[in-house]
Structures are given as structure tokens and as C-alpha cells.
Amino acid sequence: METVMEDEDYKWTEVKLPSIHPEPEPESEPESEPELERGTAERRRGRDIVIAIDHGHNSKHAFDWAIAHFCRLADTIYLVHAISDLKNEVVYVATQGLMEKLALEAMEVKTKARIVEGDAGKAICKVAEKLKPAAVVMGTRSRSLMQSVVQGSVSEYCVHHCKSSPLVIVPGIEVGEESII
């Protein structure tokens, strides 16, 4: 586990995910550019998409929704989880396991994972500022207006402060109450 410290308030570590997509081998110089078929994944330019995750069911619902309805084959997904201290091995190992599980579920899309140290809302916005993704996907707990005002929420913070497009997925009736680990 190697921690990258870009500035005083932004520390993160890249999670090594199991390799699902083979790395392309460097080719010798091709004689001519191959023709790409119209509408194929090779023709489309991939987008970077940040998906904020935690160990809750609403986060899993947002992840599933993004994979099913938003992501394309050429996209790169960045799974981001914020923790208070990167040196906490118990939380790091649990989060790494969660990210590996989610990466396997999104096997058709290239996936990278980061664990970021700090307050969740600020950390997600900081990652979005650095990566400049097409969207930041996150779940919400569907609190009432009064609860959101009193307690605050990560998704509300990101909607107001994120420089990329935040996409907040509200859970439906089918989302359960249990944790995904």
C-alpha cells in the first residue's frame, strides 16, 4: 500500500484490482490505420466516470444503476471510497475487498479504484477536480429535507461543490437495508 500525497489535504492510495482486461501489447508500427466500424466501442472515445462507494446498500444501488444505464464499454470507472485514516488496515482491507468485488461485477468496463483520506464530500470533490470525469455517480439515503439540513449529506455537499457533473441516484423500493459486505 503506497500512499500518494499530492498536497497537504489530499492523500490517496491506488487499489490494485485483479486484472480482467489484458493489457494491449505494443505493436510494431502498422502499415496503415485500421478502419473502425461505425458505432463500435473502439470508435467511441471513452469517458472517465467516478463512482463514490461505501459499504452501504444505497451505494451499491448507485453502482448497479451506473453500470446498467450510464457506462459504455469504452469508459473507465474510478471507484472512490473516502476514509478518515489510510493507516487503518482493517478499514483498508475491507474497502479493498469491496472494490475488488465491484470491479468483478463491472468486468466489461475498465475499472480503477482509489481510497482517499479525508471527509467524504471534500475527498470526492477533490478526486473529481483532479480526474476531471464526465460525471460523479453517488447514492443517497433519501432523508427528509429537515434531516438533510440538520445533519448534512455527502451527496448534497457534492451537488453544491463538485466541479464535475454530479449524478445522485435515489434508491427505489427494491433496495434493501443490509450492507453489501
Image (cartoon, helix red, strand yellow):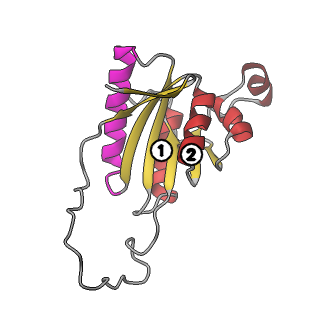
Q: Looking at numbered disc 2 in the image, what kind of residue is underneath it?
A: Val
Q: Looking at numbered disc 1 in the image, what kind of residue is underneath it?
A: Phe
Taking depth in this image into account, of 92 and 147 the one nearest to the observer is 92
Mark 1 Cα-neighbour bin, 10 Å: few <14, some 14–19, many ≥20: many
Q: Residue at x 70, y 40 (%)?
A: 159
Q: Is residue 125 left or right of residue 48?
A: right
Q: Are the residues tagged 2 and 1 within 8 Å (C-beta)?
A: yes
Q: Residue at x 65, y 50 (%)?
A: 165
- The answer for how far apart the CA atoms under marks 2 and 1 are is 8 Å
Helix, strand or loop for disc 2? strand
Asked where in the image residue 95 lies, by quadrant, the reply is top left
Q: Residue at x 44, y 49 (%)?
A: 77
- The disc at residue 137 is 2
Q: What residue is disc 1 on?
A: 63
38 is higher (above) or lower (below) than 133 = below
Please provide percent x and percent y for residue 112: 38, 44
Q: Is residue 56 visible?
A: no
Q: Residue at x 44, y 79 (%)?
A: 39
Of label 2 and label 1, which has the lower sequence position? 1
Q: Is residue 166 left or right of residue 98?
A: right
32 is higher (above) or lower (below) than 20 = below
Span shown in magenta? 87-108
Taking depth in this image into account, of 61 and 26 the one nearest to the observer is 26
Please provide percent x and percent y for residue 157: 70, 32
